[in-house]
Image (tube, rainbow, N blue to C red):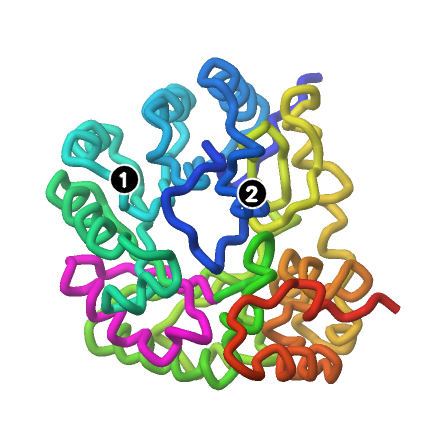
C-alpha cells in the first residue's frame, strides 16, 4: 500500500548566504563573513533539490529567503518550480535590491506577499540596525512592489533600541500603504548572539511596543502579528486583543522547515542544528526525523510547572540553545528576568559604551 506524502505547512528556502545589508540582529550563522565562505548552490542543483522536496512532502507554501533572495537572478526559476507543484509563494526581503523591472516581472507570479523589514521610522534609526545606506532603498523597494500590485507585508524586528518607537514605525508603514505588519521581536540566534546586550528587549520594552501596536490595531485596523514566540509568563496576550500572537510550530503540522544554502534541512531558519542532508536523504523521512518529532518533548527546567509548556515550549528554542546552552535552553527573553546569572552577565555587558558583546560573555556555564 502506498503511503501518502507527509504534510507540512511550509519550507523556507534560503536561496543564498549573501545579503546586501549587515543587520546586527541577523540569525544566520553565515552572516559572519557575508556568506562568502558558504556560498550557494548552482542553479541546476538548487532547482532539482527544491523540485524533489516539493515532490516528497506536501507543503502549503514555500518562503523564499536568504540572505537576500533577490540577490539571485534565478529566484524566478525557483518560483516556476513552486508554481508547477501548485505551491504558494511568500518572499522575505529587505527590499533594497528590487528594481522596477524586477517588480514588473514578479507581479504575474502573484506571491501571497513580499515581506519587507523596516526597523525605524527614520533613516538614522533603521540604519542603526541594518547598516548605512539602506533606508531609502528599502522605501523605494516597497513603493515599486506596490506600484505593480504586489502585496507587501511589513516586518519590524523589535529590539532594545527601537521598542519605544514602534508606533512611529507602524505609522510609517501605514503611510506607505502597508497595513499588515509582522513583529519579530529580537531573538538572538546565529550571528545575533554577539549583540544580545545591545538588542535584547526587556518585558517593559515589549509591553511599551505592544501597547503602541494595540492602538494601531484598534484605531487604524492594522493587522499586527507577533511572529516570534512570546511566552505568557512574560507577556499576557489577553492584554493586547488587537495583536495576534504566534508560537513555536516545530514538531507540528504548522512547522516551517529551513532548507539551507547548501541543501541542509533544519527545524527552522533560526536553528543551526542540521536534521539531515537534502541531497542524500529523503525529505519525507527528514520531516519525520526524531529531531523533529521529539522536539517538543523537552522543555527548560523553569517551564516544568507551567500549564503552557506543551504549547509554548519555553519560547524560542534556537535562541535558548545559542545563548543559554543545550542543557537548559530557556529563551533569553525569559531568562533575563528569572536567571540570576544571565541577568548579571547582561548588566555587566551593558556597562560603559560597548555595543558588541561576544556570545561567550553572555552564555551561562553548563552545569
Give the total number of marks visible in the rendering. 2
Determine the residue located farthest toward the left in the rendered image: 147
Magenta-drawn segment? 157-185
- Residue 323 coordinates in the image, percent (x, y): 68, 64
Residue 79: name its quadrant.
top left
Residue 306 at least partly seen: yes
- Residue 181 coordinates in the image, percent (x, y): 32, 61
Magenta region includes residue 183: yes
Residue 23 or 49: which is nearer the viewer?
Answer: 23
Residue 165: name its quadrant.
bottom left
**Secondary structure of the residue carrying numbered label 1:** loop
Q: Quadrant of the N terminus?
A: top right
Residue located at (38% from left, 48% from top) = 21
Residue located at (34% from left, 74% from top) = 242
167 relative position to 278: left or right:
left
How crowded pointer 2 is (Cα within 10 Å; few <14, some 14-19, many 20+) is rated as many
Residue located at (49% from left, 54% from top) = 26
Q: Which residue is mark 2?
A: 30
Q: Quadrant of the C terminus?
A: bottom right
1 relative position to 37: left or right:
right
* Disc number for residue 59: none
Note whether 211 is above or below 29 in the view shown.
below
Q: Which residue is mark 1?
A: 97
Note whether 216 is above or below 229 in the view shown.
below
Residue 282 or 326: which is nearer the viewer?
Answer: 326
Magenta region includes residue 306: no
Residue 254 at least partly seen: no
Amino acid at each position: 500500500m502506498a503511503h501518502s506524502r507527509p504534510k507540512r505547512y511550509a519550507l523556507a528556502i534560503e536561496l543564498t548566504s549573501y545579503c546586501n545589508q549587515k543587520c546586527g540582529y541577523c540569525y544566520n550563522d553565515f552572516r559572519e563573513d557575508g556568506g562568502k565562505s558558504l556560498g550557494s548552490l548552482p542553479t541546476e542543483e538548487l532547482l532539482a533539490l527544491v523540485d524533489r522536496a516539493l515532490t516528497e512532502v506536501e507543503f502549503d507554501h514555500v518562503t523564499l529567503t536568504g540572505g537576500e533572495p533577490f540577490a539571485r537572478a534565478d529566484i524566478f526559476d525557483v518560483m516556476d518550480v513552486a508554481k508547477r507543484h501548485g505551491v504558494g509563494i511568500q518572499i522575505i526581503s529587505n527590499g533594497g535590491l528590487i528594481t522596477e523591472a524586477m517588480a514588473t516581472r514578479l507581479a504575474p507570479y502573484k506571491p501571497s506577499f513580499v515581506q519587507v523589514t523596516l526597523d525605524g521610522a527614520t533613516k538614522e534609526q533603521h540604519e542603526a540596525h541594518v547598516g548605512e545606506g539602506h533606508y531609502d532603498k528599502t522605501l523605494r523597494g516597497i513603493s515599486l512592489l506596490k506600484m505593480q500590485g504586489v502585496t507587501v507585508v511589513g516586518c519590524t524586528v523589535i529590539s532594545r533600541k527601537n521598542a519605544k518607537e514602534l508606533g512611529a514605525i507602524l505609522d510609517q508603514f501605514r503611510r506607505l500603504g502597508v497595513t499588515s505588519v509582522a513583529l519579530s521581536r529580537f531573538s538572538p540566534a546565529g550571528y545575533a548572539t554577539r549583540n544580545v546586550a545591545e538588542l535584547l528587549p526587556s518585558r517593559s520594552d515589549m509591553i511599551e511596543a505592544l501597547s503602541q501596536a494595540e492602538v494601531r490595531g484598534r484605531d487604524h485596523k492594522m493587522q499586527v502579528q507577533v511572529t516570534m514566540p512570546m511566552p505568557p509568563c512574560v507577556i499576557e496576550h489577553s492584554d493586547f486583543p488587537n495583536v495576534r500572537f504566534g508560537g513555536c510550530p516545530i514538531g507540528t503540522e504548522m512547522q516551517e522547515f529551513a532548507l539551507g544554502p547548501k541543501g541542509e534541512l533544519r527545524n527552522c531558519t533560526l536553528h543551526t542544528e542540521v536534521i539531515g542532508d537534502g541531497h542524500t536523504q529523503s525529505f519525507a523521512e527528514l520531516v519525520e526525523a526524531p529531531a523533529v518529532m521529539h522536539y517538543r518533548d523537552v522543555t527548560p527546567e523553569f517551564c516544568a510547572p507551567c500549564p503552557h509548556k506543551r504549547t509554548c515550549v519555553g519560547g524560542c528554542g534556537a535562541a535558548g540553545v545559542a545563548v543559554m546552552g543545550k542543557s537548559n535552553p530557556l529563551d533569553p527573553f525569559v531568562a533575563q528576568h528569572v536567571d540570576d546569572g544571565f541577568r548579571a552577565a547582561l548588566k555587566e555587558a551593558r556597562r560603559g559604551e560597548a555595543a558588541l558583546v561576544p556570545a561567550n560573555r553572555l552564555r551561562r556555564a553548563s552545569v
